[in-house]
Amino acid sequence: MSAAFRMIVRAPGGPEAIQRQELDTLPEPGPGEVRIRNTAIGLNFIDVYHRSGLYPLPYPAGLGREAAGVIDAMGPDVTGWSSGDRVGYLFAASGTYATHSLASAATLIPLPDSIEDSLAAATMLKGLTAWMLIEKCARVKRGQVVLVHAAAGGVGSIVVQWLEAIQAVAIGHAGNPEKAKRVHALGASHALFCPFDTLASEVRALTGGAGVAAVLDGVGKDSWQASLDSLARRGVMVTYGNASGPVPPVAPLELSRRGSLVLTRPTLGDFVVDPDERRDGADKLFSMLASQAIRVDIGQRYALADAAEAHRALEARRTIGSTILLP
């Protein structure tokens, strides 16, 4: 067996807090669990929150929320799966930044032949997040106009394409002209890169003063005011990330004053607990990918042992598209 290891943090901190821990023996699956030999691991901004302590974990802790690989051992009471099956999975308790991880068999997602392991690892968490934001939270309908922040990023780039695939109108906002060009190439109806303090006025100009039906905002504090100012009457504010820090407290009366806005702060875990709902989301995502209605650019590939460098690039917003770690 080649060297087995995982990447952990012993206490919250910067990228330098990520350490390699050798595994002298492979973890053994318990009842209802399988062991997966990871072939590709997804990198997501929530990993930064766990590492930094914004979303605290019991430390020392493993990092990582998604991966793809092959089942190589099964615990008692596991049915419907076999060693050698290709699977994707989310939310492994011990983290996915590892050569081998344990996961509940009930949470596995079978990978169709049309989806490579690297593509699955790069898209499952982000793609299911896009499905959640569009279909479950904002409930976007054909023809509605939606503002998408960080539209060149991992989630944003999928959201833009998904919106256009269902014939909604995506206004994508990005951090610089180069990223805005990418957003335009993804099919966004409009691609902006203006400062946040002028964003709402540009959005209003594009919508004849009406504003947008929904804002999908993973940036957080820096974009908060622009997001609220961009919404139409009875618009839906979906804040799902804190790339620039947590959003400030908001009084419910502020939502009323702005036109009976709806505010939600979802987390994907609450939308994939039910196996049928999780499978529905995965089926829709894989169908979009297979038909190429959604194209995912794996812009960066790092060795698993170089996870700290991957975190530095992600936090500095030097990444484009998705990033994966390779054991």
Image: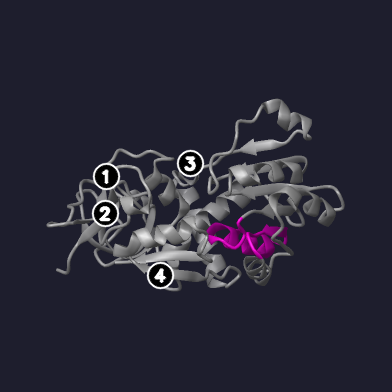
In the displayed structure, 71 sits above or below 213; it is below
Marks 2 and 3, the one that precedes in the sequence: 2
Q: Is residue 73 left or right of 249 when viewed as pictured?
A: left
Residue at left 66%, top 27%?
A: 251
| Residue 122 drawn at (x, y percent) | 45, 64
| Residue 161 drawn at (x, y percent) | 63, 64
Residue 13 highlighted magenta (yes or no): no
Marks 1 and 3, the one that precedes in the sequence: 1
Nearer the observer, 137 or 238? 238
Tag shown at residue 132: none
Secondary structure category for the residue under label 1: loop
Question: Dividing the image into 4 quarters, which one contains the C terminus?
Answer: bottom left
Q: Is residue 128 left or right of 1 when viewed as pictured?
A: right
Tag shown at residue 270: 3
Q: Is residue 321 left or right of 191 when viewed as pictured?
A: left
Q: Which residues are magenta?
A: 150-176
Q: Is residue 77 left or right of 159 when viewed as pictured?
A: left
Closer to viewer: mark 4 or mark 1: 1
* Residue under pointer 2: 19
Residue at left 48%, top 62%?
A: 123
Q: CA distance from mark 2 to mark 1?
A: 8 Å
- Amino acid type at image mark 1: Arg
